[in-house]
Image (cartoon, rainbow, N blue to C red):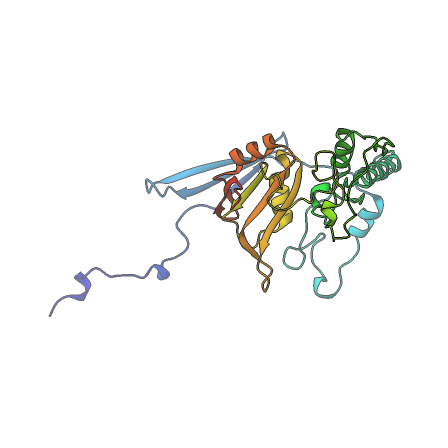
Amino acid sequence: MPDLASKPSTTNWADDDDDSGFPAPLVTSNPDGTKTVISYRVNPDTGKKVKVTQKIKTTVVKERVNPSVAERKRWAKFGLERGSRPGPDVKTTSVGENTPLKLIVGWKESKEEKVEISKAEAAKVKAITCRTCGGEHFTSRCPYKDRLPTADVAADSNASTPRTATPEPSAAAAPTTGPAKSAYVPPHLRRTGASGGRGEGEKMTSYRDRDDSATLRVSNIGEDVTEDDLGRLFERFGRIQRLYLAKDRETNRSKGYAFISYYDVNNATRACERMNGRGFENLILRVEFSRKT
């Protein structure tokens, strides 16, 4: 029968005595007001017993507070906090960030300056006047830009068109021979000049006679694009005379193409070079000069 005493006894770590044989920490007060604490422990790296000497210095920090705040700190706590130490307890109180209050002098003057700046900005907004209808909006966003000419264009046309005196019928003119015909004459043929052509101001312009040399055709446009979007995109290259966006009658959404006319051909050329092949609303725009069909 084997001897049980010869077998090594296996002990549980929980059965070990907490007393490791180390002496209790020794605290000594020094003449300079510090304390020296001497303790012993086992170095986990080497497994050897080491002596630890700590020198502790206690510093008293004085803080100036408001007398009323200091008085409130001495109040006795009540309820569930009865008997707790002074000050907020992290278990029952959440302390936020300290927000300093900065008092400045002349805050009324700064407020008056802000009011004056807002009035100046409002005056700038009111100073915007449409050249087409005279409203308080940009000319490129005028709802009547396709129906009414702008003031600049009307002034230029009046300045470039000289006034000619109406020739009075001379008494020495040869009388027409033969009886007068009472046949119907169309309105555009009633006033004729000396050369038998149409009179000034009687010629009616048609789609064929319209000058589209400064008109661009923009295609590959998204369905959600509006005329305002195209106006803001193309008006930086020059003054826009006419903007037409093809829309579906049922959904009122873009069909994918538009026509933009400038007053100057150079502006249209620059817009075509800059905007052709540019990405807009996840699509690549195709900009080219419009061609009559």
User: Residue at the spot x=67%, y=40% of the render?
Assistant: 241
> Front-most of 272 and 25?
272
* x, y percent for residue 288: 51, 40
Q: Looking at the picture, does residue 247 appear above or below residue 286?
A: below
Tell me the quarter of the picture where residue 189 sits: top right
Pick out the residue farthest to the bottom: 1
User: Residue at the spot x=41%, y=55% of the render?
Assistant: 18
Asked if residue 103 can be seen in this view, the reply is: no
Asked if residue 162 can be seen in this view, the reply is: yes
User: Residue at the spot x=76%, y=63% of the render?
Assistant: 78
Q: Is residue 261 left or right of residue 218?
A: right
> Front-most of 263 and 159?
159
Instruction: Give the mark count.
Output: 0
Tell me the quarter of the picture where residue 250 sits: bottom right
Pick out the residue farthest to the front: 178
User: Residue at the spot x=56%, y=37% of the render?
Assistant: 28
* x, y percent for residue 277: 47, 39
* x, y percent for residue 269: 55, 32
Q: Looking at the picture, does residue 85 appear above or below residue 23?
A: below
* x, y percent for residue 135: 80, 45
> Front-most of 103 and 114?
114
Tell me the quarter of the picture where residue 7 sits: bottom left
Q: Looking at the picture, does residue 2 appear above or below residue 191?
A: below
> Front-most of 99 and 233?
233
Q: Quadrant of the N terminus?
A: bottom left
